[in-house]
Image (cartoon, rainbow, N blue to C red):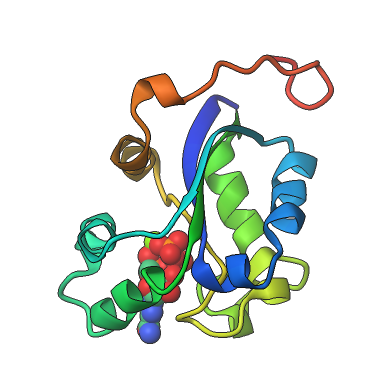
Amino acid sequence: MAIERTLSIIKPDAVAKNVIGQIYTRFENAGLRIVAAQMRQLSQAEAEGFYAVHKERPFFKDLVAFMTSGPVMIQVLEGEGAIAKNRELMGATDPKKAAPGTIRADFAQSIDANAVHGSDAPETAAVEIAYFFPTLAICERKCCGCCCGK
Ligand code: RTP
Ligand code: MG
């Protein structure tokens, strides 16, 4: 399987719960490397731009309000099949429907405050990574050979 990069966001609810480290451990245990990261509070314009694909949806206003309600941790994850692997680790959008042991099942409270974001396809991953990270902010990391052999 190809080495991919995906955009991950630990949302304000999970940052407030102080579980960044626990979520990072899940990424690392699944063979994903963090190759760029930043913590900050999104502006309304940034959150609206990031979720522009949902701007006609009834939940858009609440989604933007939630995403700007506190600091988020934004990272680029790299590894074999990183996009699907991250979505699998995250679990279903609604934590009530998320499989046991997934991030959303363990840390999310509702479909609005659902702990994490992850890109859903190669095209969206490329756009979302570029939205938050200029190329120079992404590190070249060699794996020691334990997880992907790169
Ligand atoms: P995300 O983009 O945040 O990774 O989540 P996702 O792919 O699993 O879900 P998506 O359909 O892209 O929706 C983006 C976020 O909008 C909120 N949402 N609320 N009330 C609702 O019916 C509803 N549907 C979606 C969720 O917070 C979701 O993560
Ligand atoms: Mg989505």
Q: Quadrant where the N terminus lies? A: top right
Relative to 41, is 81 above or below?
above
Residue in the foreground of this view, choosing between 9 and 39: 39
Eyeballing the image, is 128 above or below 13?
Answer: above
**Does residue 1 appear left or right of residue 113 in this picture?**
right
Q: In which quarter of the image is ligand 2?
A: bottom left
Toward the left, the furthest residue is 56
User: Residue at point 53% right, 21% down?
Assistant: 139
Q: Left or right of 95: which side holds 56? A: left
Q: Is residue 55 above or below residue 47?
A: below
Q: Residue at x 70, y 45 (%)?
A: 27
Q: In this view, does 63 lie to the left or right of 142?
A: left
Q: Is residue 18 visible?
A: yes
Query: Which quadrant of the view contains residue 148?
Result: top right
Q: Residue at x 73, y 35 (%)?
A: 31
**Residue 90 coordinates in the image, percent (x, y):** 61, 61
Q: Position of residue 13 (x, y in %)?
A: 56, 74
The quarter of the picture where the C terminus appears is: top right
In this orientation, which residue lies closer to the viewer: 32 or 40?
A: 40
> Can residue 99 be spotted in the picture?
no
